Image (cartoon, rainbow, N blue to C red):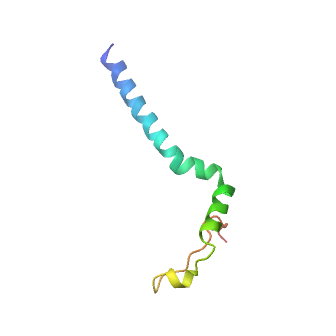
Amino acid sequence: MSANRRITLIFGGFVAAVAAAFYPIFFHPYSHRDKYKEIQKANRAGINQADVQPVGLKIWSDPFKPKS
């Protein structure tokens, strides 16, 4: 195997590993927004935002809400 081919395979493997690591972190939640909205709604159901937010910081907002 030539040196160029080996370098290409190593670099391609690295790119594939990075892509495989990013899929569950970024691409899956992005493509399944409705599922993650429901999960967040259930997780935040009994939380009073004013009680858990540190003083002086803005209260949470819906991350999926379109910006106005």
Percent position of residue 46, x then y: 61, 76
7 left or right, relative to 20: left
Residue at image coords 45%, 82%:
54
Count of numbered circles in the view: 0
Above or below residue 28? Residue 37 is: below
Residue situated furthest front in the rendering: 46
Above or below residue 62? Residue 39 is: above
Residue at image coords 63%, 61%:
39
Residue situated furthest top in the rendering: 1
Residue situated furthest left in the rendering: 3
62 left or right, relative to 51: right
Quadrant containing the C terminus is: bottom right
Percent position of residue 34, x then y: 69, 57
Percent position of residue 43, x then y: 59, 67
Percent position of residue 38, x then y: 67, 62
Residue situated furthest right in the rendering: 34
In-front residue for pair 27/7: 27
Quadrant containing the N terminus is: top left
Q: Quadrant of residue 7?
A: top left
